[in-house]
Amino acid sequence: MTSATSQPASPATPAAAPQRRTYGPAVLALAVGGFGIGTGEFAIMGLLPEVAQELGVSIPRAGHVISAYALGVVVGALAPGYASLNLLRFATGLPHGTYFGVAALVAAGLAPAGRRAAAVGHVMLGLTLAVVVGVPLAAWMGQALGWRVAFALVGAIGVLAIALVRRWLPRTPAPVQASALRELGALRRAQVWLTLGVGAIGFGGLFSVFSYIKPTLLELARLPPEALPFALALLGLGMVAGNAVGPRFMDRHLLGTIAGLLVWGCAVLALFALTAPMLTWALASTFLVGTLGALGPALQVRLMDVAGDAQALAAALNHSAFNAANALGAWLGGMAIVWGWGWASTGWVGAVLALGGLAVFGLSLAHQHRTRSGR
């Protein structure tokens, strides 16, 4: 996967035909890896009550296990107790950002001209399908066989992904000029930091709701427990819809798409807070919250545009930002519940975070305008 920073071959070059032949299988292999990582990351959200009960902690405190994984991603199962589970979740999260960052660059490099966002969206489709298929399956396995068995499934998916990546990804040498120092140059670019800030704050709204979706639907909306996998799949289907539709706009109007998604996030998260006690509407708004997953590919492509020749680090940092959002959203949502604001308050927390992301994006656009006008 060291070919991540190479540019896509022109259709006129001899490399173009083999590139087109390998694009589909390569993206599929990368998406399977994303499916495994996504299942490992998000399965805990469908198993929080079981984990909390077995480990003897409250559900909001068990939510720290979500933040532990996310913090592992920012920095780069078998658990006998609460502390060791947090430690293992942290370690599991370490390779997450690097994988998705490099996978996005590889897919963009193999994609036809003008299809970067679609290629990134296809890779992220594995992550979203994890919510549709992997998380409900893990939730069912956790309830029927125990939550530890559910995480054994994640390991099996990982083995499959390794085999597919080795089989289908082209082996291309890294650019001669590649170096760690050049990649660190991304950290000198203000637009890189501002774009990461949009993700770290604006994406937190989805996670403030998603982290506590199971107890919210069961206790507030009175969802029958046997229908929980269906509800989790609804959120995942929303993510799939967002990743399927969003890239069609991103390749043409990237900045407008990002702004629109953040405004959309404010609206649907507030809608979730208002409708959470009403089962039918709660399920509908759960689907809509899932569509916010489209922000991932949009910000990934934005980072490709502003990172210059430091593509690999910037792409990996994008997922660090999203998992900072995961940690922030899970923590703030949990605090709102602990402070007695109720399960629906996670939607209001999410709306505020989406609004914060929109404010940071406004700063990014203002900085870009000042830079171009020479002020």
Image (spheres, rainbow, N blue to C red):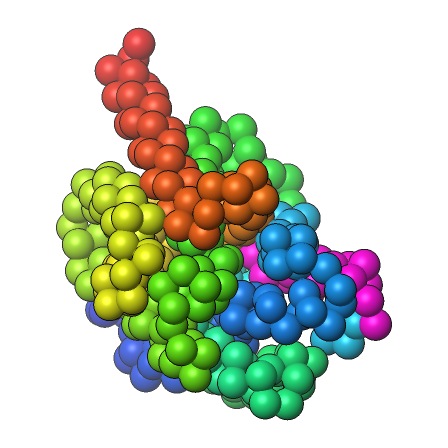
| Quarter of the image that includes the N terminus | bottom right
**Is 277 on the left or on the right of 317, as rendered?**
left
* Residue depicted at 40% across the width and 60% down the height: 220
Identity of the residue drawn at 49% across and 58% down: 212
| Image coordinates for residue 330, horizontal then vertical, percent | 54, 50
Q: Nearer the viewer, residue 111 or 240?
A: 240
Percent position (x, y) of residue 179?
62, 47
Image coordinates for residue 241, horizontal then vertical, percent: 25, 67
Viewer-closest of 73 and 178: 73
Q: Please report the residue visible at 52 percent of the width from the left and 85 percent of the height from the top.
A: 140
Q: Residue at x 58, y 44 (%)?
A: 338
The residue lying toward the viewer, choosing from 307 and 360, is 360
Q: Is residue 293 above or below residue 145?
A: above
**Count of all numbered marks drawn on residues in the image:** 0
Q: Main secondary structure of the magenta part?
A: helix
Q: Is residue 226 above or below residue 38?
A: below
Residue 111 visible within the image: no
Location of residue 277 (image quadrant): bottom left
Whether residue 257 is visible here, answered yes or no, is: yes
**Residue 243, percent across and down?**
29, 64
> 106 left or right of 375?
right
Quarter of the figure that contains the C terminus: top left
Residue 221 drawn in magenta = no
Residue furthest to the top: 375
In magenta, the rendered stretch is: 80-97
Find out whether residue 90 is within the magenta segment: yes
Check the image and report above or below for 99 versus 300.
Answer: below
